[in-house]
Amino acid sequence: MKVLLRKVTKRPLDFDLKSDEITFKGYLEYHSGNLVLLRAKLSGSLEKPCDICAKDFKLLVDEDIEFFISDGLFEDDGSIKLDLIESFDGFANIDELLHSEIELIRSDYHRCDDCKDVDEFEF
């Protein structure tokens, strides 16, 4: 799902995407200048290998996502407190944003229930 950034207004533009067992639901809203605010909830579960024993397990996901999307290059004056993504084609690709958020979660350190109490240095 691609959204033309210059068409996003102060009235929230809702989106609801699903990838396997993950749901990405939220909205885009014009903020100021060339900035669009994305607020969303990422929820569901995904398969991931345990970082201790390497067995696959279901990782429960329940994340609030909030960042700005800039339509073009953004000159930071220090007033923006959220993360920011620059778009150089004038579009917000929501599918791509969903998959990048999933990969961020996958790349973090996670343990299965069997390894919750294991000290990784003693394994």
Image (cartoon, helix red, strand yellow):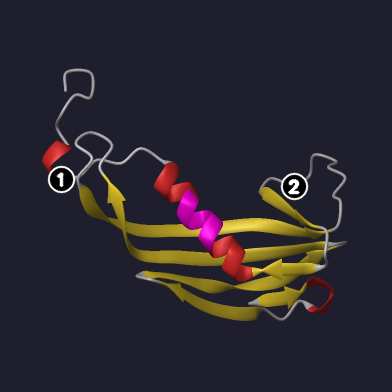
Residue at x-position 23% and y-position 18%: 121
- Closer to the chain start, of discs 1 and 2, is 2
Q: Of residues 73 and 67, which is closer to you in this image?
A: 73
Q: Of residues 31 and 96, which is closer to you in this image?
A: 96
Kindly identify which residue carries mark 1: 113
The part of the image, by quadrant, that contains residue 20 is: bottom left
- Magenta stretch: residue 5 in it? no
Residue 49 picture location, percent across and down: 28, 46
- Could you tell whether 102 is left or right of 8 in the image? left
- Name the amino acid, label 2: Ile
Query: How far apart, in angstroms, are the residues tagged by discs 1 and 2?
Result: 38 Å
- Name the amino acid, label 1: Asp
Residue 103 picture location, percent across and down: 48, 51
Q: Is residue 90 above or below residue 107?
A: below
- Magenta stretch: residue 101 in it? yes
Asked if residue 115 can be seen in this view, the reply is: yes
> Start and end of the magenta stretch?
99-103
- Could you tell whether 62 is left or right of 86 in the image? left
- Could you tell whether 107 is left or right of 2 in the image? left
Q: Is residue 86 above or below residue 26?
A: above
Residue at x-position 85% and y-position 41%: 77
Residue at x-position 11% and y-position 41%: 114
Secondary structure under tag 1 reads helix
Kindly identify which residue carries mark 2: 80
